[in-house]
Amino acid sequence: MKNRIDFLKEELNKYAYNYYVLDNPLISDFEYDKLFSELKEIEDAHPELITSDSPTQRVGGISSSFAEVKHKYRLYSLDNTYNYDELKKWYERVSKECGYNVDLVCELKIDGLAIALNYKDGIFIEGATRGDGIAGEEITQNLKTIKAIPLKLFQKADIAVRGEIYMPISSFEKLNKETEKPFANPRNAAAGSLRQLDSTVTAKRDLSMFTYTAIIEKAECEPKTHWDSLQYIKKLGFKTNPNIRLVRDIDGAIEFCKEWENKRFSLDYATDGVVIKVNNFACQRELGFTSRAPKWATAFKFPPEEISTKLLNIELGIGKTGAVTPVAILEPVLLAGSTVARASLHNFDEIKRLDIRIGDRVLIKKAAEIIPKVIKIVETPEHEQLPVYEPPAYCPECGYKLETREGEVNLYCVNEKCPSVLKAKLEYWVSKEAMNIDFIGPSVISQLFALNLVKAPQDFYKLTEADFLKLDLVKEKSASNMYNSIQSSKSQPLSRFITALSIRHVGKETAEILTGAFPTLETLMSANKDALAETEGIGEKIAQSIYEFFHNEENKKMLEEFKKLGFVFENRNLKRTAELAGNTFVLTGTLQTMTRDEAGDKIKAKGGKVSSSVSKKTSYVIAGENPGSKLDKAKDLGVIILNEQDFLKMIGE
Ligand SMILES: [Zn+2]
């Protein structure tokens, strides 16, 4: 019986570790639950066999209050700064005191709740909130419900650790949708969830923990540096933050801070700065503490994410759908590490609702989005004297009367020849989401448009290298890059081509659904409305729009042109293509991962042909490093050129 219990505990702890700490589930929830119920059943029948490290002890219970406990080791505060010069001064001080330039460890400062955990013989015995650093509240039961906290370590050890409890931003947003009284931020949500007298409530909340400090009393390993101690506690089963870096000096640390000032918005947890610690424990001991903080560590705080500034003007942006949107032009201000002079104003309804007027002071916020947003007006004494903002009636570019569409808040320019709309479509064509063409940005497009070289997407493919040399500051090297980048986009999958067409209501996902159901352009063009609407995930509104697009005479002409330019229009889902039959390949240049002969064998194995010279019959040219004249010939003939990576994708490697 006990053997079975031990086996189940070990299995369940292993699965929980892989799921919650490594983010790498090994089994399904269903399988986990089955093992869990078995353990629960045996334990219910034999309560004397329940141990504190059993996964069944993670479910929680009710306590009447939290007892105060004195921390075994004091939790100090950290000195902090917003200023790189102060970081440098701090580094000079500690290096001078230690006698050499010390190594540093940089870690993200998680915006959560600090806690202290104690382990004896590898078993979690007690956990408490930070409190005043000397004593905190004992919340062991609640902490046990957090599955990123190991109940039993992989090795026996007497150890005290500190970590930060946090709630992932996605879970916070979900929780706020479900609760009546929303929390102000993920930090408050984590605190509210953790300090529940009924820990079954805590158990239901998605909390996690990053461990960042270990005080080792007795263990198999005695790390000499902070970096090694982090690696060691990771081995013991603790979750540590993956975004840490060992650097040689303060410049390395500043680089880390700068990097994360913006990158932090891509994380699913809140971070408000970087903690920088002296790596060597002997140096740490030498430096010691002030009355409130260690001298061997400091924190760099990220600049605020919200700030107020003056709204100087409202410009109008025109998108590829013809939608006209307001853009705030601001008095430049430093926000979250970058100077902001423009921000999104959502739509004209929002401006009216917030009564935003040009000349107001407004609060802007930078969140996960790259473009900051205007949130609201902040105190502006002269607000009432400012003229109320009137949405435009005419397109600022072409002068067409703007229209509204049923059920939408945007205003639209419906002129199909509106230069702004055409340019926006071209910009979308080259974007990462669509044809993913490098080296061609808005300014290049604007010049090509002004020179009458490109008015519609197909025109890109008619350009010669000489055409690019007509543009400002473009030299031969970049002209050739631009040209090649455009030409190689011909081999993009059909779904990207469909996306790039900017068909109303058809984005990337819809395009993928479409090309899944209609694997060639011909089948898609000839599909009737019902067939389109019956496709899973399409529906009538989208079907109507697709149908109209492909039955428009001008669009038909455009697609015909693409065909003449060498586009293939098949759902060559590169990954899944196993069959190269009917295709002739020419190899040129040096490949990185294989020889040309090996590549040839792979092509033949899948039914394709390999030829030594490029002709009109060549389907693809695979170009490696230093390609020869074959590449030039392929370009002249409009043959699709693949790089090595494209080729590997095509054959499923
Ligand atoms: Zn217009």
Image (cartoon, helix red, strand yellow):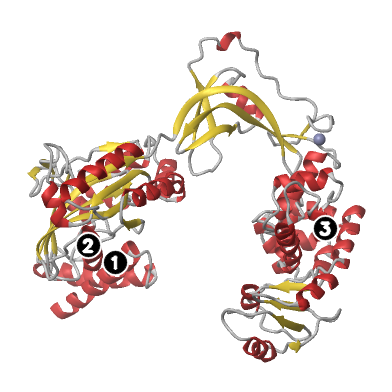
Q: Which mark is residue 17?
A: 1
Distance from label 1 to label 2 (Cα)? Answer: 8 Å
Q: Is residue 318 left or right of residue 52?
A: right
Residue 6 found in image quarter: bottom left
Q: The disc labelled 2 sits on which kind of residue? A: Pro
Q: Is residue 113 above or below residue 465?
A: above
| SS state under label 3 | helix
Discs 1, 2 touching: Cβ within 8 Å:
yes
What residue is rendered at 46% in x and 50% in y?
Answer: 266
Comparing marks 1 and 3, which lies closer to the viewer? 3
Q: Is residue 1 left or right of residue 390?
A: left
- Residue that label 2 marks: 150
- Residue that label 3 marks: 466
Q: The disc labelled 1 sits on which kind of residue? A: Tyr
Image coordinates of residue 481 in percent, x first then y, are: 70, 61
Q: Is residue 556 above or below residue 380?
A: below
Q: Earlier in the sequence, mark 1 or mark 2?
A: 1
Question: How many residues crowd around disc 1 within 10 Å: few (fewer than 14), some, or many (20 or more)?
Answer: many
Image coordinates of residue 538 in percent, x first then y, are: 70, 57
Q: Which part of the image, by quadrant, shows the C terminus?
A: bottom right
Discs 1, 3 touching: Cβ within 8 Å:
no
- The yes-or-no answer for disc 1 within 8 Å of ligand 1 is no
Distance from label 1 to label 3 (Cα)? Answer: 59 Å
Comparing marks 2 and 3, which lies closer to the viewer? 3
Q: Which part of the image, by quadrant, shows the N terminus?
A: bottom left
Is residue 415 visible to us here? yes
